[in-house]
Every structure is written in C-alpha cells, then in structure tokens.
Image (cartoon, rainbow, N blue to C red):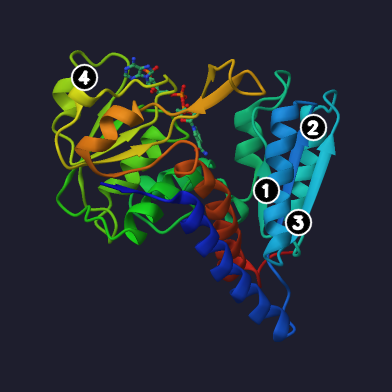
Amino acid sequence: MEIIDGKKIAAEIKDELKLAVAELIKNGKNVPGLVTILVGDSPASESYVKSKAKSCLEIGMRSKIEKLSAETTEAELLELVEKYNNDKDYHGILVQLPVPKHINEDKIIDAISPKKDVDGFHPMSVGNLVIGKDTFAPCTPAGIQELLIRYGIETKGRHVVVIGRSNLVGKPITNIMLQKKEGANAVVTICHSAAKNIELYTQQADILIAAIGVPHFVKADMVKDGVVVIDVGINRVEDSSRPKGYRIVGDVDFDNVAPKSSYITPVPGGVGLMTVAMLLKNTYKAYLLYGEQNG
Ligand SMILES: NC(=O)c1ccc[n+]([C@@H]2O[C@H](COP(=O)([O-])OP(=O)(O)OC[C@H]3O[C@@H](n4cnc5c(N)ncnc54)[C@H](OP(=O)(O)O)[C@@H]3O)[C@@H](O)[C@H]2O)c1
C-alpha cells in the first residue's frame, strides 16, 4: 500500500509553475495574474482567498483580492467582474463562493469570461468538458486526475466508481475520467444518495473516488483488495484531545481501508492540497491561451 502524497505533488506543480513564471520575467513578459473576489465577511472564505493569493505570489504570479462588503449589490458585483474581464493583467477571475443570498450565483458565474474561468464553473467550461474539448476543468477534480497521472496509476479501461454527484466534484471528475485521453479513458459508475446497496457498486471499483461529505462513509467491506482510493471528503469531527476541539477526517475509514488498498489519499494531506495548485495551473493556462488577447 502506498499513501498518495498530495503535499509533495502540489509542491512539485508549484515549483514547475515558479520556473515557468521566472522564465517569463527573465524575457520581460507580463506575468499571469489572478483576481479573487470575496463578498461578505465569512472567516472561512477569507482564509481560502488569502491562501490562494499567497500561493500566487509565492510562484511569482500577480495576485489581487477584491474584498467587498456583504451589502454589495448584484449589479455592483457584475460590474466588477466585467471590469476584470477587460483587464489584461488578470488572466483568471475567481469569485469565492458562496456569495450572499441576495446575489444570484449563476448570474455571476455566467458573467465571468470563459477565457478567464479558472474555477471551471462557467456553463461553457462545463459543456466543453462534457464534450471532451480542452477547457478549464474545476480545480479539485483536475487535482485528482493529476495525482493519478503523477503516481503512474493506470486509468484506461479500469472501473472508476465515484460516490457523489455535485457540480463541484462528482460530476466533473466523472466527465474527466470518461474522456478518451491520457489519465482518463475509464469505465465510470457514479453513485449518489438514492443508490441502493451502494457496496455492490463500490466493491467493483478499481479506483474509488469518495466525494460525499460524510465522515468515514467508506468502510473496509465496501472495497476490494488492491483498490485505489481517492478521498475528497473534508469533514470536521469532535475531538477533545485537539486544541481546537475537532479534527479533520475524510469520507473514507482510512485506518481500515488503507490495508486493503494499493494506493490511498490521506485526509488531510491528499486531494485538498491539490485544489490551489490546480487553480494556479489553470491561471497559467489562461495566460498562455488568451494572455495576448486580454484587454
Ligand atoms: N479541495 C477539496 O479537497 C474539496 C473540494 C470540494 C469538496 N470537498 C469535500 O468533498 C466532500 C464532498 O463535497 P461536495 O461539494 O461534492 O458535496 P455535496 O455538494 O454535498 O455533494 C455530496 C454528494 O454526496 C452524495 N451523498 C450524500 N450522502 C450520501 C450517501 N449516504 N450515499 C451516497 N451518496 C451520498 C450526495 O448525493 P445527492 O446528490 O443524492 O444528494 C451528493 O451527490 C465534502 O466533504 C467537501 O468538504 C473537498
């Protein structure tokens, strides 16, 4: 059994991007830029946005946080998005979700130029992913594929079972794995809360991807020997022995599933760290594809 080290792979990706950006700077070129827009005062969202901005700066990319008050109107937010759609220094635009309830999230996502949609949530990006065109894939599922590729885990013709059908993880990783491309080309089954006897599906998985949001949902008797397990879950469970009174666990009962698996991602230290790395990668891709056309 091998533990998939998301921290190591995320660092590798950041190092590669840092080198690429240094080369741009050396040649007197503009650098990729990411603007993150945060509406409201959620401490969790603020910490996500800060960590994304910090990672950009670490690799030499341009980064800006637009922090707006919770009272910002939909029209004001749309205007700001449009401003960055036309700003040639920012190749990626990320509106941190969720936005306050008085703002229509879909309208905001639709307003982001598909050329700057580094989160991969615009319907154009989603559609392109479904029909197998090169596009911006959402960062967490893109990170899962990157882990599989960099660990040399064969996906072609293997049975990938995904638990969860969210637009954020379950559906995009299904569409990524279905593509007739390297690091994909799998046979995919997708399960959700209406699945009956879910273990009948999970026991057939060569690669099991759990994106459920239920602590320790996947038990040892639900997987076959040699399975590759990708645990996307990030769940808080009470733990009085920890200073904060809780700890983070995944959707997989790691201690009991790990001995049966060939590869497994830990939580924390697995998929979670890949999301920001892939956001940086998408921003660099937006720069390469459309940098000259921006503005
Ligand atoms: N960076 C990261 O690492 C990252 C990013 C995103 C999410 N996450 C974590 O990944 C987990 C999933 O996130 P999400 O956004 O996809 O969650 P979500 O939108 O709540 O979706 C959860 C999915 O799991 C399914 N599900 C729930 N209970 C189930 C059950 N008992 N049996 C079978 N399926 C069940 C749901 O089915 P229905 O559709 O039928 O309701 C739904 O499709 C969360 O722990 C989240 O924190 C991590």
Q: Are marks 2 and 3 in contact (CB under 8 Å)?
A: no
- Which type of secondary structure does the marked residue at label 1 adopt? helix
Mark 1 vs 3, N-terminal side: 1
Separation of marks 1 and 3 at Cα, in angstroms: 9 Å
- Which type of secondary structure does the marked residue at label 4 adopt? loop
Query: Which residue position is annotated with label 2?
Result: 75
Separation of marks 2 and 4 at Cα, in angstroms: 44 Å
Q: Mark 4 vs ligand 1: CB under 8 Å?
A: yes
201 with respect to 44 (left or right) = left
Mark 2 vs 4, N-terminal side: 2
- Which type of secondary structure does the marked residue at label 2 adopt? helix
Query: Which residue position is annotated with label 1?
Result: 52
Q: Nearer the viewer, residue 201 or 181?
A: 201
User: Horizontal and vertical percent for residue 55?
Assistant: 67, 55
Mark 2 vs 1, N-terminal side: 1
Q: Nearer the viewer, mark 2 or mark 4?
A: 4
Q: Identify residue type, mark 2.
A: Ala
Mark 2 vs 3, N-terminal side: 3
User: Horizontal and vertical percent for residue 94?
Assistant: 66, 45
Disc 4: CA contacts within 10 A as few (<14), some (14-19) or many (>=20)? some
Separation of marks 1 and 4 at Cα, in angstroms: 36 Å
